[in-house]
Amino acid sequence: MSGMAVAPFDFSRYIGSVCHVRPTTLEVNLPKAAATGGGHYAGYSVPAGQVGEFVVVEGEDHAVLGRLMEVRLPERDRLTVEPTSASDGEPSPIGVVQILTAIDLTTGRALNGVPAHPRIGQHVYSAHPLVVKQAVEAGGGAEALKIQLAVFPHAQNTSVSLSPSSVFGRHCAVLGATGGGKSWTLAKLMEEIIRLEGKAILLDATGEFHSQTGPVKHVHLGGKATGPDDVREFISFPYYYLTETDLFVLFRPSMGAQAPKLKEALRSLKLAALAPTIATAGAVKKAGAARQNFEAAMRLHEAALLRFGTRYDIARLPQQIWEECVYPTGFDARAATHWGGAHPGDQAYCTSLISRIEAEINSESMACVFQPGTLRTLPEICDEFFLNDDSHLLRVSLEHLPFEHNTRELVSNAVGRYLLGRARLGRFKKMPLVVLLDEAHQFLDKTIGDENNRASLDSFGLIAKEGRKYGLTCVLATQRPRDIPEDVLSQMGMFIVHRLINERDRAVVEKACGNLDASAASFLPTLGQGEAILIGVESPMPLPVLVRRPLHEPVSRGPDYEQHWGKL
């Protein structure tokens, strides 16, 4: 037993004996389970028959590790626990233990499966927290180099530490209903990334993580300073990082004349920026003009026109749409080489689109997208962050981005697309990057826009599916697991599941987690604040934990009604 942290079969932790063996469960006599309370030994609790307790069953080469799922009295002993009972007999409770895994007594490692089931009469012991810790924390390594995430709920002097690769290496999902501790867990994960000098970007949907301090850079997408004393840094995410589909969702052209003219206008403006000689005052004049130079420039810059992030002047877009409203050819001898004159019908059809675009690009709430001006851009900030060895967390606040026309979702999706593009270039091979997405259900498994112009929010789903091989992984935090696509959840290597009350949410999590069965999922509605169940690909079993309180708590509380109401 030299490989074990402590002796697993300490008679001071004896709680009963096996009386019934099934393939996946055991029934155990629990003579101490009828006591009104558990006990303590050597500074650790011995619940001795409490539902949820981990137990070990003795064996020669291995110990069977299980969890107590049910405690009951046989019918004959049912009344012996009543104060008014005339019976002098001691009750004989029976417990049902779910078999989880087996532990090699030589190495202390969890085994794949159970080599041999327990026999009738074998002794059962309350599992020492250090035995469970050793079985769950696969692999060695210094404690200081691990994610010190949580402790055991009933042994808070025993920490649960996991390797960074087991938490972040295959993506992580933090799930839980409101008030369950999801935001605390996200804050604690960020603090651990900072402590271990990793790299992470947080997309803060509500601004509740502004309390994070240390080697953290805070930037704000949208909004503006409230006065000279406002030291927050406001940045932009320029329109040229949006795709044509994104812009169609924002500008909502009709499928008649408007959509083709908008498409042509965007191409013309990009070409005007790449080949200024074909433009007049930044726009391409087409009415009666020759097509030769324009078409030659298109052939020359074909690759740049398709490249993500090609710059152009969107302020010219209303004018360029008007310039596109021409007949494709003239009606004279120059018909084959020149555009025709202005098309009054197309101009009339596009008037409403032009007005809508002018309103959008001049809107104050959309200034961070369409009027970047002197603001630094998020891609610039990201590049600086990647190169700065002293900065470990970049928090991007989205609280000021407008909800109108799905701007928040489109911009967040474009940020994910940008990061995935950088990852595909090999930017994160030597220094992996973790992207933390709060309120993930807002940005996944959604198709936005109207019946004519629709865009799928797929960038973070693509990160979950292919980002790992590039060194880019994600942490998705949400209170609505049922709104996360099944194929995205299936990519998660670690689940940190807080209290879940909704039955559909529990069913989705149970289906997505390979080793979370109905018995373990039945504990989810009763978890307390900060309590969670860890389910990992490398973990031999679901593990109940209490997440450590973060040093910098997120500010997620709503208004205090008792303080503000009833004062009139």
Image: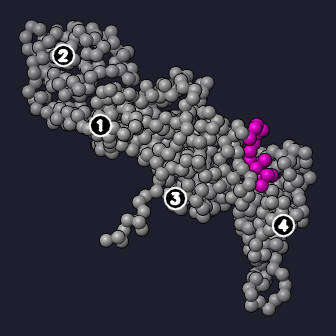
For disc 4, the marked residue is 15
Residue under the point 60% across and 27% down:
431
| Amino acid at the residue labelled 2 | Ala
Q: Which mark is residue 281?
A: 2
| Lateral position of residue 16 relative to residue 241, left or right | right
Measured in 3D between alpha carbons, the distance from the residue under mark 1 to the one under mark 4, in whole angstroms, is 65 Å
Depth check: give the residue in front, 68 or 182: 182
Dot placed on the residue nearer the N-terminal end, 2 or 4: 4
Which residue is depicted at the point 60% across and 64% down? 526
Q: Nearer the viewer, residue 513 or 310?
A: 310
Disc 3 or 1, which lies upstream in sequence?
3
In the rendered structure, which disc, 1 or 4, sits on the residue that comes first in sequence? 4
Q: Which residue is mark 1?
A: 366
Provide residue 148's location: percent of width, then percent of height. Answer: 67, 45
Q: Position of residue 3 (x, y in %)?
A: 87, 44
Q: Quadrant of the C terminus?
A: bottom left
Element type at mark 3:
loop
Q: Nearer the viewer, mark 2 or mark 4?
A: 2
| Mark 3–mark 1 distance (CA, rounded to whole Å) | 33 Å
Q: Residue at x 58, y 63 (%)?
A: 525
SS at circle 1: helix
